[in-house]
Amino acid sequence: MTIDKLNEIANRMVAPGKGILAADESTASITKRFESINLESTENNRRDYREMLFRSTEAMKSCVSGVILFDETLRQKAADGTPLVKLIKDAGAVPGIKVDKGPKPLPFSPGETVTEGLDGLAERVAEYAKLGAEFAKWRAVIDVNDQIPSYNAINANAQALARYAAICQAGGIVPIVEPEVLMDGAHDIDRCAEATEWALKETFQQLYHARVALEGIVLKPNMVISGKKCPRQASRAEVAEKTLAVLKRCVPAAVPGIAFLSGGQSSQDATAHLHLMNAAGSLPWKLTFSYGRALQADAIKAWGGKPENVTAGQRAFAHRARMNGLAATGRWSQDMETAA
Ligand code: 13P
């Protein structure tokens, strides 16, 4: 696979006005989401839910560039026997796969983790490519408080991300590189900026050592934002400004696009932040979304696990996708939310 081919896939993943639907919740995570609507997490229920999203044809075609899947979903068929991957491709979106095996405690670094999943990854990537995946995702998790992150955690996670990214590119698929600085703590926005800058600097250093072609990756970072428990919550404008400042310091222009995670932001905040950054003017990379919760929360609620609510679920999903599609080109406004 040439760099040109990887670059072409990466560019499709960040096509103007479109973004990525992160539907790669592990079985444990989707079970938690289903608990909120009192729905049992069976294989068929998980299939029905994802099928509802992927069959939201208009939203998929106009606002979704790619979909990140969990292993089970990549192999699943819709109720009528159509492979779910085919639904995604027919809508013109790129199918992708989560390949990490989750964060595990990092010895001698209390409260910190390193994401595992490198053993046998080349073989798994080869199989996933055969099943139709054109990109992969690996999420590193960096927690923040007064004491952490440590260099041990920053370095171990950046090295793992770089090895993962190299394995993907060697196997012909685009790696989404996701170093997530969590917003769960009580830290303020400047502490988040500091940790995010450190994580990104080290990640790009390790990508360089691992000989990863930056033209063939998509970066999936957190926004620079106040910790959820911080008494002073930064404004939307401050989040946009500080996120852009850190990204400009850290992300080379060779990277085709940056697709943010939502990380626990409200659906509308995640949209507003993305919009403000894109409205701020010309940038060296595309800036879009790769949201899980912020794209799905309203849809899952409207659906409630009931077949008679599929249309309502699709309508809720289509609205969020459209709002985020507009934000990805700086054309969203708050009154569009209330109008709908
Ligand atoms: P959230 O947008 O819910 O943070 O999920 C995106 C994702 O894929 C995290 O790895």
Image: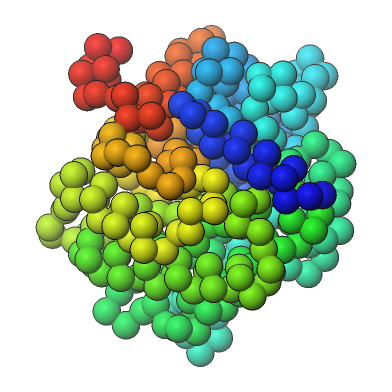
Q: Is residue 95 left or right of residue 332?
A: right
Tell me residue 11's x, y (percent). Answer: 60, 38
Instruction: Residue at 31%, 52% (x, y): give it.
Output: 244
Q: Position of residue 158 (x, y in %)?
A: 55, 72
- Residue 167: x and y in percent read 76, 62
Q: Looking at the picture, does residue 58 appear above or below residue 168?
A: above
Question: Which of the 4 image quarters holds residue 321?
Answer: top left
Residue depicted at x 23% and y 50%: 241
Q: Would residue 133 be seen by someone viewing this image from the given angle?
A: yes
Image colouring: rainbow
Nearer to the camera, 11 or 304 = 11
Considering every residue shown, the one lying at the far bottom of the view is: 108
Which residue sits at x=42%, y=64%? 250
> Looking at the picture, does residue 78 appear above or below residue 258?
above
* Residue 128, image x, y percentages: 81, 46
Q: Residue 183, can we see it? A: no
Quick check: 141 left or right of 7? left
